[in-house]
Image (spheres, rainbow, N blue to C red):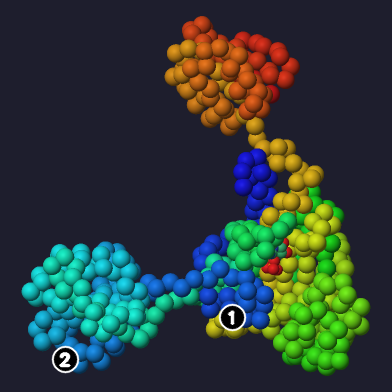
Amino acid sequence: MLPPDTALWNFVEAAVRDVFRAYNFQEIRTPIFEATELFARGVGEETDIVSKEMFTWEDGAKAADYAVYKRWITTRFPGVSAFQQIDPDTAESQSPVPTMSVQLDGKWNFIVFVYRLTAQAVLELKIASEQLDNNKYEFRLVTADPLPDSFRFLVGEVAVITERVSLDISSQLLTLRPENTAGVVRAYIQNKLWDRGLNKLYYIGPQFRRERPQKGRYRQFYQIGAEVIGPPASGSESPARDAEVLEMLATLLDRLGITDWNLELNSVGSSQERVKFNEALRVALAPLKDKMCADCQRRAVTNPLRVLDCKVPEDQPIIEKLPRITDFLEEESRKHFDAVQDILTKTGVRFTLNPRLVRGLDYYTRTAFEFTHGALGAQNAILGGGRYDGLSEALGGPAAPGIGFAIGEDRLVMSLQEKTPAESVLRKPDVYIAPMAGMNADAAKLARELRRHDLVVELGDDSFRKLKKSFEAAEKAGAKYILIVGENEVKSDAFALKNLATGEQISVPRAELAQKIQD
Ligand code: AMP
């Protein structure tokens, strides 16, 4: 991403922060990568995202788990009399790998635990051996690396005994976040955010999915999202929250000038209602699925709900005739959905009902929605979201109903580009200061003064011998004015200011410059 395009991104983000503030949302920043397990549970093993799109790697240097190491040591050396742990997480520690010292028959053992026999681990031992008395210490490296049992090596003068272990100094699987809801809910649980009542959080940041890159679909893309989450007593389950989130999104899109959006709305019911619906789909699909695409054949068995998501044209007539979730909603869910629609109608937010709109996971409940925009072509969804009343529990937390959405920022910017070119939101220099020979210092002083008045000032260079070169640079930068700083000007404390559009040139006293340029 390069300028001037980044100006459009900044324009979008400034509008987002402004609108979200009016609804009392506050920013949360979660890590770019988290334990793979979080996404497996929080997004769902069954989804395309988890099953084939995550960037995942194995990290050997798992955070120290001293309970595990201690257990290993006491089993391995029953006579151990004293422990000393050097915790990589403490400020005093220089060591990024978990290390322990244990006293055995009066002799200390310095033990480094690493998953792989890395250069870092060897360096660690080297530093330790230089600091510790070799006669009093034995140096041991405990690793899960496949090494011969009696493998020994020298670090400097010191023989290091290595031991291969199968204990859990194991590696950890980490994943670049493919979406942000799981991270927010993890943060909610870890930081006991229920103490704050209802949380209204938003984020802006990159997400990663291993997809085939094409227009509107990238491996690193940006999402702007928000989550309303809290204990049931905080009103987090209320249809008023769903409607507020949807109304906020309508306001945001309108404010950005994307007025021809479509809000598609559905209710996917409670988890019990969905079980019944899924079963009905399974039954209905059994005799039909062989005529459908390969994905649908698989989904018809694993997760029939996802069949409704299929975009293959040939499958559409079959899907049209399948049972509809609306027929499976019971009283409470129906009331919830009606209330959401009622508020939207009263607040003047238009929507269309789309009974095929689903979110495929068990803990997604009730309201599901998508905003689409014609200008985007095949990848026409700008944003999607819904209620996830069971997600916190699925991640090991307390009941915390919530609703959220994620806007694809790349696509949002793309839909803006036509009406709002990046150039139109880019703030060009108000003035280009052109110093004559030897006048750089005076020019810098003047630039400093003018910038204090919130003017955008581009500062030239006195090596441009000819003024013509400064004029060219000023035009190229798109400056409104050029200001000439020569010896005469400095002496008289009045400067030649030329309007580059009209060609008009006047001499302006220093004290009046900022005002004149602002006019
Ligand atoms: P999802 O998390 O799949 O519901 O996606 C939410 C929004 O993120 C979508 O509506 C898209 O606008 C956007 N999005 C999802 N995947 C990508 C991608 N690979 N590239 C660009 N935008 C994406």
Residue 143 higher or lower than 260, as above or below: below
Query: Which circle's residue, 1 or 2, is located before the other in the chain?
Result: 1
Q: Amino acid at mark 1?
A: Arg
Is 130 displayed left or right of 361 in the figure?
left
Tell me the crowding category of disc 2: few under 14, some 14 to 19, or many 20 or more residues within 10 angstroms, Cα based. Answer: few
Residue 384 higher or lower than 481, as above or below: below
| Cβ–Cβ under 8 Å for marks 1 and 2 | no
Q: Amino acid at mark 2?
A: Gly
Q: Residue at 48% of width from left, 17% of height from top?
A: 463
Q: Where in the figure is residue 147, as x and y percent of width and height?
A: 30, 80
Which residue occupies the foreground of this view, 140 or 110? 140
- Quick one: which residue is furthest to the front in this view? 148
Q: Which residue is mark 1?
A: 41
Q: Where in the figure is residue 437, as x and y percent of width and height?
A: 48, 12
Q: Quadrant of residue 324?
A: bottom right
Q: Which residue is mark 2?
A: 79
Q: Residue at 64% of width from left, 26% of height from top?
A: 476
Q: Where in the figure is residue 403, as x and y percent of width and height?
A: 69, 72
Inspect this view and state whether residue 63 appears.
no
